[in-house]
Amino acid sequence: MLAAAGPAAAQSASTPSSTAAEPAPTASPPPVAPPAPAPPEPAPLAAPAPPAPPVISQAPPPPADERLAILPVDIHAFASQGFILTTGNDYIVADTKHGSFQFSEVGLNVTKEITDRLRLGVQAFAQNLGLGGNFNLKADWYYVDYRWTDWFGFRAGRLKIPFGIYNEINDVDSARVPILLPQSVYPLQGRNFLFAQTGAEVYGFLRSSSAGALDYRLYFGTIFIDLAILTPTGSPVQLQLNVRYVGGGRLFWETPLPGLRVGASVLAVHLDTTAFVSGMMFSIANQSLLAMGSAEYAVNGMVATVEYSRWHAHQDSVLPSSNFSRTSERSYAMLSYRVSSWFQTALYYALFFPDVSQRKGSDASRQDDASLTLRFDANAHWIVKAEGHYMVGTAGLGAPLSISTIPPNEERHWTVFLLKTTGYF
């Protein structure tokens, strides 16, 4: 912007005069015009104004109750309905050989950040699945979580058990491709006592620029088991259960190779059972140790997963027939691929040996499970899945911890077909 300046002084014109004698006057020449005034000199550029100093607010931070109102409340919900049809054997729920819609679940969870470090959460859940169904509403999980730093945090409540890669998303159908996770490792009938524990946990995440990162979880508490999943209605056996403790941990290494992580999980349970049969009382003590190794590699829409697990159980009681020390072997390999934003597919092969000392023998000594899943994302809040399984063996027909045995005369080769739709937000 040009600065304003005063006009330059105009130069005055001088008129020449003469006193010498002149000849007879003649016509006067035209007057000489005065010279035009000189144009004003350009004004110098004004110096730029210094930038205004930043305005620093001296207002005090909002009080705690106002901060609570500012921080968001996250609310999510889901509802699923499935259908199961089997050939040869009933699976997971009753009468699947004629088709069953007893495969439903609904949940609502709320989480709230109290501060940058403190967080609360709870989920209400109900399902209709097998003996533990009938839409009995319960607090599926709840927690108080305080994180001091990235490498150390603490949470308490009813907490999801970090066992393997997928145990914590057993209740989140939208977070995975298969309808049924590999049942050799993640038995749906065991969700009531393998999904969550009531106690405390410490966790953390440590990162290194050259060695990748470590993600650790350590927990200790107890488990409340729904007796309905152990004793069918009308059973002559009545049980009282006391889980003295459950404890364990998981360690994952995020390797320097992008997309590759490997880890190990361990879970220990001490369970005391009192059984009442025909007026007689029997005490049973069970100690179990579950261990699993995991590896996952994700690249360009493809995820390859391999997990291998051994579950060792040792049981003592006054009944010699109830005493045993047994190790089961469980494994699977899975490959999933995102074809497009609305279509994913997955296939896996799972293997289950209830007793590694008896790998060969009856049909109940093993189960092979080959599965294929097609997932369609209709939109951001609705998915539809179709899945088929080809089974060999009947070891998976017995529910974990159930006192019931595998029915005789079951078919060795059989299939499972599932449809499931889930709405969520």
Image: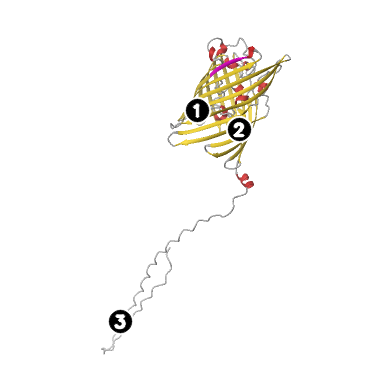
Q: State the mark number for residue 29.
A: 3
Residue identified by numbered label 2: 200
Residue type at mark 1 is Gly
Q: Nearer the viewer, mark 1 or mark 3?
A: 1
Q: Where's residue 313, x and y in %? A: 58, 19
Q: Quadrant of residue 33?
A: bottom left
Q: Nearer the viewer, mark 2 or mark 3?
A: 2
Question: Is 63 rendered above or below residue 130?
Answer: below
User: Is the Cβ of the residue at disc 2 closer than 8 Å to that at disc 3?
Assistant: no
State the extent of the magenta-drawn residues as a range: 323-329
Question: Is 20 rendered above or below residue 245?
Answer: below
Q: State the mark number for residue 263.
A: 1
The quarter of the rendered structure image containing the N terminus is bottom left
Extreme residue in the bottom direction: 21
Q: Mark 3, residues whose alpha carbon is within 10 Å: few (<14), some, or many (≥20)?
A: few
The quarter of the rendered structure image containing the C terminus is top right
The earlier-in-sequence mark between 2 and 3 is 3
Secondary element at image label 3: loop
The earlier-in-sequence mark between 2 and 1 is 2
- Cα distance in 3D space between marks 2 and 1: 21 Å
The reply to whether the magenta stretch includes residue 27 is no
- Cα distance in 3D space between marks 1 and 3: 114 Å
Question: Is 265 rendered above or below residue 356?
Answer: below
Question: Is 35 rendered above or below residue 279?
Answer: below
Residue type at mark 2 is Ala
